[in-house]
Structures are given as structure tokens and as C-alpha cells.
Image (spheres, coloured by chain):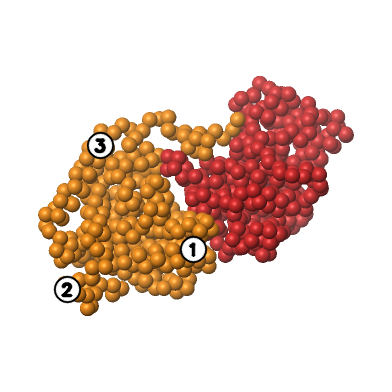
Chain colours: A orange, B red
Amino acid sequence: MSTASDRAPGAAGSGLNDDIGEDKRLALYRSQVRLRDAEQRAFDLFLQNLVKGTSHLSLGQEAIAAGFAEAMVKGDLSFCTYRGHAHTLARGVPVEKVLGELMQRDNGLMRGKGGSMHLTSEEHGVMGSYAIIGAHLPIACGAAWRAQYKGDKDVSVCFFGDGTTNIGAFHEALNFAAVWKLPVIFVCENNLYMEYTPIKDVTAVEHPAADRASAYGLERIVIDGNDADVVYRTAQKAFAKARAGEGPSLIECMTYRHSGHSRADPAKYRPEGELEKWKERDPVKIYRERLKQFGVSDDKIAEIDASVRKEVDDATEACKAAPMPPLDILTTDVYADGGWAWRN
Amino acid sequence: MAEITYRDAVIRGIAQEMARDNDVVFLGEDVAKAGGVFKATVGLYEQFGPLRVRDTPISEQAILGAAMGAAMTGLKPIAEIMFSDFFAVCFDYIANEFPKARYMSNGQTKCPLVVRTGNGAGSRFGAQHSQSVENWCMMIPGLKVVAPSTPLDVIGLLAAAVRDPDPVIFLEHKSLYATKGEVPDGEILDTLGTAKIVRPGKDCTIIALALMVSRALAAAETLHDEHGIDCEVIDVRSLVPLDTQTILASVAKTNRLFTVEENPRLCGWGAEIVSIVADEAFYDLDGPPVRITTPHIPLPAADILEDIVLPTPGRIVDTVRRSLGS
Ligand SMILES: Cc1ncc(C[n+]2csc(CCOP(=O)(O)OP(=O)(O)O)c2C)c(N)n1
Ligand SMILES: [Mg+2]
């Protein structure tokens, strides 16, 4: 695990390393709380049968989404998986738009045409959520190729799970990105499970992403994915490298999902005590303590918590009141002319 | 006006579009420095340079995925998949990614790209390098599917495909690369979704695609000269969008329909056309529509075997004569 620490030896005064700064720290906290509350709400709505179909939560993995999104600037592009609510929200997409899509209402991000696994908001740089394992790694390469070709400074960031490192597209994309020196960052969220199977049972190496990095000439990076500061700092380095034209990075973030794989999965396949152990390292809890160390007042923290709660509550009510999508969107946007005509 | 090969038409079509628009970029295996395994991209690297004409690793998923990411964010990529059989190793992009992105995102995501590929039999390469996969592509909502039969159509339809805002699968027939045709000077631009009547006639309609067009035409000449049957031959050219109006109008005139398909029989494109005609022009027909196809078998390598399974002018002549009772 990386030694990137919050306590920089020799830092003046409190002994705390304040390279991140108060504004960014508050933003990182706010983002994590927002993802936590929105995901918890999505789960509650699923149990009420108001979220239909499927849903893959990032409860427990919020520090990664928040840390990367806070390191991005406008124009940077996110490519997500079906477990993409958090990454979508972290780029600033309103909670109502995400919950609306999960509830398959007309106010949803894609008016119910995509569903929870395909959240897309190009205006926020969210270039899609992909439900075929590994598919988006090559796609992120293509977006990065465009940036390289055009001389644009944006970076494409591709999030995926530990299980994804065992599919061919992962390896094709890593090699391709390395050979073409593309401004793309591959972020593996190692939550120890691919669906219901422990990743160690099906992978030849201990660290499914990082231990493959050398095969593509990349640095081996494993970090604490539950510490938003560590994630943020690591992200910044990777962005600087990409923007300098020095090519891709592969970052393995160790984390754990607090909920099941999807829907109402009770996650019985996990050994007893494992969840409890990881909950001691809950990213939101860690970060709340971090703020206190930096002297942020309880009132300030409570104020952030309350404003987030209000956004989620308001969004929930708006979604419950929103109509279902109209039938006339069934045949729109199959082709670029807006329709679905395949013949004259 | 000049006579050029189908292969040179591919080069000219790509070059025309790359010269017109800097956002057109081209990637694939062995396409740049080597000029392509079919020599259908020779000179592009020299003309447009290493930033626009790029060799890739043997990574079909990376090729198509990268094309998609580039297309989504503003470029107009042309991607080459060396043999269309290899679609099977990157079919996720063809079936799940390109054609669904716009719909799933409620119109946010665009995917203006072209996948060029060497399709079809005749090279004695066996079952994994000879298939006609147009039916694999035609069935997917959101894709467009084009298969030209002449050098002129290669240039015009390729230009139309590159300028089209949707993902287009562009099937070049391997056995046509060496064939020649007249091509005018200057820019050539055609229209997707238009079939072409390549031989007018009044006794029956024969619809063909790619390599089968020349065979249908040869059969039509024999049927005319030796049997007094006047066939109308239509090059369907574009399977999606499909020019049903040209087909229906022809059947209304000739009252008989034949399809000549290189793809294996089950779910071949001709089945769709026959079904459309049966639905919409049943009473125009004087007899059952007839499909002349490759049988439902993997393709054999040996020339003597491969030659038997593809529809030939002889088989077309026999089938038409028998059906018309002459
Ligand atoms: C090609 C493909 N194979 C299998 C699946 C089914 N599937 C969905 S999620 C998943 C597990 C992925 O695990 P991981 O990459 O670790 O991501 P996580 O769900 O843990 O975030 C599987 C097998 C799929 N969607 N796509
Ligand atoms: Mg996992």
C-alpha cells in the first residue's frame, strides 16, 4: 500500500500536511457525503420497489469517485461502469437526474432510456456508463487519442473493478494506451470481489491491476482507496503526467463495498467480520475525522451534512412526483436523424 | 475518367475524405507503413502522415473501442478490421456499443465512424477468413451497413459513410479488390440507402449484393441471350438503410423476385427482402419469391468445394429458368 500519508514529516505547525487546502478538503468531504446519502437513498428506494431493474451501489467506495472528480477540471472525461452512480454524481450531475433515471422517470438523465447501468451526462464530462465488462477501456483510449491528435489538454479517466482486469479488453487497452502514449488514466477499484467471487480466487496475481502494470511498462501503483486525500493526490500526479504528454497511468485503489454486488444482494459470500473490519475504515468516517483534525468545526460539518441531505430529500420527492416517460421517445435517437427509420 | 481497381478505389475514397476533413483519421493493423494486407491502403501513410494513419497492435477491441471514443469526442475515424470474420472478437462494439450509445443516452452520444473490412469468399482461405457477415450486422438497430460492388460505388459510398453521422459497417469484397471499373475525375459522393438498377428488365427482378452483382448480371445476359428472359438486376448496395421503394417498384413491374446472397442461408438479407415483398406486394407476385444462397454450412477451403457452394451464374440461370417454367 502506498505510504502517501496525511502527516508529512517536518510540516510546520500542526504536523498536518495541508497541501490540499481547506476549500478542496471541504469539497472532498461534501462530495463523499453526497454520494453516500444518494446511494443509501437509491437502496431504500430499491427496497420500496421505486428503483426498478438493477442497481449497483458504491457505498464504501466514495473516496475514489470523490478524489478523482475533485482532481478533474472541466473538459476532463469520465468513463464509468454499471457501478457508476457515484462517478456520475461526483462530476456534478444533480441527484434528481440520477435518482430519476434509477426510478425510470421522465426526469431521469436519459428519460429512462438507459437505466441505472448507463448513466451519461456529456455536459458534465460523463461519457457514459458501460455494462459490458471492460468495453470502456478502449473507448477511453479513443477519447484520449482525440485529445492527443487535437492538442487538447483534457484527460480521459476510466473507472472499473478488480474483476475487469481479467478480460481481454483491459489488456488490449493498456497496451494500446502505452504504445500510443495516450492521456488516459485507468482506475481500478479493487473491492476484493468480482460479483460474488473473491478476486483472489480467480486471478493469478495478488494485485489484479498493479501487478500487471509492468507488462505495459507502467509504474506499479496501489493506494488506499478509502482515503480521499490519498486518492486526490495520486490523481493529481496522474493528471499532470497525462497533460504533460507522458502517457497513461494505471492506479489500483484498495476499497470495499458496504452493500452487495447489486440490487438487494445480501453478500452472504463474505466471511464473517470482513465488512465490520472495513467499516472501521469507512471513507466518510475517515474524512470527517480528518476535517476535525484540521480544525473544521462540528457546526460546519453538520451544515454540509444537512445541505446534502436536503438535496437528496428534495430530489427524492421530485422523482416520486415525476411522470413516467412518454411512449413517443421509444423510437427516437436510434439514428442521428433523431428517428429509427431503417428503410424508405 | 479513368479505369481503376476496386482496391485503388478504396485508397482514393479514403484519401478524398482525409484530404477534405482533418478530423478523418484512420487506424488498423498493418494499414499504415505496410499499406494493408490487401494493399488497399497503400500510400495513405505517406500522404497523410503518422498522426492520421496509424498502425495498431493486433487488438480488434482496442481498434473499434478507440474508434468509438474518438468518434464520440469529435473525430471521424475510419477503422479497418482486416477480415470481417474477426468481427467475432470485437462484436461487443458492433453489437452493444456503437449502435446503442445514442439511444441509451437519449441522444447525447454520437458515434460517427466507419468500420471497413474485407468480407466474402473466393480466396480459398477456409471457414474463418471467407465469410459474408452482412447478416451479422444488418440485424442490429442503430448500425448502417453498406457493401459496394464497383470501384465507383466504393468511392461514393465510402465518402457517404465517412460523412454520415451514424456508425457505418463498410463491407469490401475481397474477391473484388482486383476488379476494374470506370471512375470519373474529381470528388465522388453517393447516397447511403439507395439501391441501383444495374440492368433494367421486365420478366423478373434479381437482387444481389457485392460479388453477387456481377454474377447476377452474367446470369441475366445468358437468360436473355439463350432463353429470352429479360431480368432486371438490382444492386442493393446498402442493407441499412434499405431502399425498399426501388425493390417494390421493380417487383410491381416484373412480378417475380429472386435474391442472390453470398451469406449462409439462415437469416440472410434476402429473407428480409422476401418478407417485405410478401407483406407489401404479395399481389404483385406471379410466383413464389426464390432465394439463391450459399447453403447453411461453414465455407470449405478447396477451390473445387468453395466454387460449388457460392451462387454462380449457372445456378442463377437454372434457378430462374426452373422457376419461370422456361
Ligand atoms: C463481459 C461481461 N461479463 C460478465 C458480466 C457480468 N458481470 C457484471 S458485474 C460483474 C463483476 C465485475 O466485477 P468487478 O470488475 O470487480 O467490478 P465491481 O462490480 O466489483 O465494481 C460481472 C461478472 C458483464 N456485465 N460483462
Ligand atoms: Mg470488484
Q: Amino acid at mark 1?
A: Leu
Label 1 and label 3 in one chain = yes
Helix, strand or loop at mark 1: loop
Of circles 1 and 3, the one toward us is 1
Residue B92 relative to residue B234: left or right: left
Residue under pointer 1:
A182
Residue B195 sits in quarter: top right
The chain letter under disc 1 is: A
x then y, percent, for residue B168: 59, 45
- Using the image as rendered, state which of residue B250 and residue B184 is in the foreground: B184
Q: Amino acid at mark 3?
A: Ala
Q: Amino acid at mark 2?
A: Gly
Res. A13 mark: 2
Q: Earlier in the sequence, mark 1 or mark 3?
A: 1
x then y, percent, for residue B211: 73, 46
Q: Is mark 1 within 8 Å of ligand 1?
A: no
Which image quarter is the C terminus of chain B in?
A: top right
Which residue is found at the position 43% from the left and 53% from the top? A132
The chain letter under disc 2 is: A
Residue B129 sits in quarter: bottom right
| The furthest residue to the top | B283
Which residue is found at the position 68% from the left and 41% from the top? B189
Alpha carbon distance from label 2 to label 3: 47 Å
Res. A318 mark: 3
Residue A213 sits in quarter: bottom left
